[in-house]
Amino acid sequence: MSAPLEGRVALVTGGARGLGFASAQLLQQRGATVVLLDRDPAALDAASAQLNAAHTEVIDVTDPAACEAVVERTASREGALHILVNCAGIAGVNKHVWELSPDEFRSVIEVNLMGTFFMCRAAAQTMVETSGGHGRIINVASMAGKDGNPRASHYSAAKAGIMALTKSLGKELATSGVLANVIAPAVIETDMASAVSPEQLEYMTKLIPMGRLGQPLEVAKLVAFLASDEVSFSTGAVYDISGGRATY
Ligand SMILES: NC(=O)c1ccc[n+]([C@@H]2O[C@H](COP(=O)([O-])OP(=O)(O)OC[C@H]3O[C@@H](n4cnc5c(N)ncnc54)[C@H](O)[C@@H]3O)[C@@H](O)[C@H]2O)c1
């Protein structure tokens, strides 16, 4: 049996590490041609070396022109774009609403929400035109976007925005052959989780009934499923991956 994603071309933002890298690795193992996008050139080189020299591009997803250019370059080099995984994100500082500066709040919205918007905006039409009905957009939100984590209002607001953005996009593309879905993970063991304060990590871990952090591969398996033809009647949907934390 041939690999299920053979012939598919995938862009993965935040692909240099963490959930982006794990997702890219699994997509590649399942046959996709993967392009890793990240703003960290050294980490991108290391990631590419682990992924059979996957193509990489250094981009900042907060730059709409760069997002458009990378989609255009990829589609003309590979002949099509089928899969877009938006993983680039930052957690920002952990402070109460009244302690956050406008810039601290804005920067988290800018990367997580605007970055996801810029990539979806850049890729949607190209995916409709070139994916032959196999278009799959997977945006990465968070449980924080459903629940609102304390001392993470910027991050929670950005992730709630990603869910709403994806629900709208899913409806807009419903008959186009491009599905747009969103995943909402609880805490997953990556560099991002190690960077939050110990108190914040303890708070988030205690909310997980399974009593443990998720692993990047567990998220990658959901991403790969949503990127595949196994999904055909879901779009604009939120997929929780939370060890039981999600209640709605
Ligand atoms: N790890 C978790 O617990 C967790 C939980 C829920 C949701 N998420 C979300 O999953 C996604 C991936 O998280 P992760 O844990 O792998 O994080 P990570 O910090 O390990 O990796 C994020 C990657 O995104 C890149 N990046 C950041 N800003 C960028 C920008 N402006 N342009 C391009 N690249 C940029 C970073 O360089 C990094 O390589 C994020 O959107 C995050 O919010 C993570």
Image (cartoon, rainbow, N blue to C red):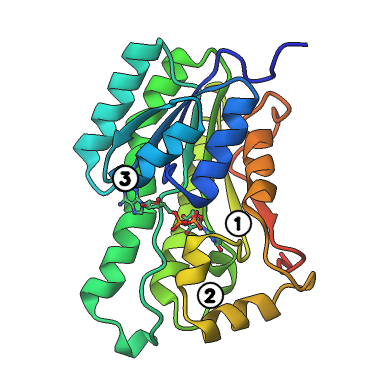
Ligand 1 within 8 Å of the CB at mark 1? yes
Dot 2 amino acid type: Gly
Query: What separation in Å lies between label 3 and label 2 (alpha carbons)?
Result: 33 Å
Q: Give the position of the C terminus as an image quadrant.
A: bottom right
Q: For the residues marked 1 and 3, what is the alpha-carbon distance in whole angstroms?
A: 28 Å
- Residue 148, numbered circle: 2
Q: Give 85 or 122, whichever is nearer the viewer.
A: 85
Pointer 3 or 2: first along the chain: 3
Label 1 and label 2: CA atoms lie apart by 12 Å
Q: Amino acid at mark 1?
A: Ala
Task: Please name whichever residue, 127 or 84, is drawn nearer the observer in this view of the structure.
Answer: 84
**What's the residue at 78%, 73% (across, down)?**
209
Instruction: Say whether residue 180 is visible.
Output: no
Q: Quadrant of residue 72?
A: top left
Circle 1 — which element? strand
Q: Nearer the viewer, mark 3 or mark 2?
A: 3
Mark 1 or 3: in front is: 3
| Label 2 SS | loop
- The number of callouts visible is 3
Residue position marked by numbered label 1 in the rendering: 184
- The label on residue 42 is 3
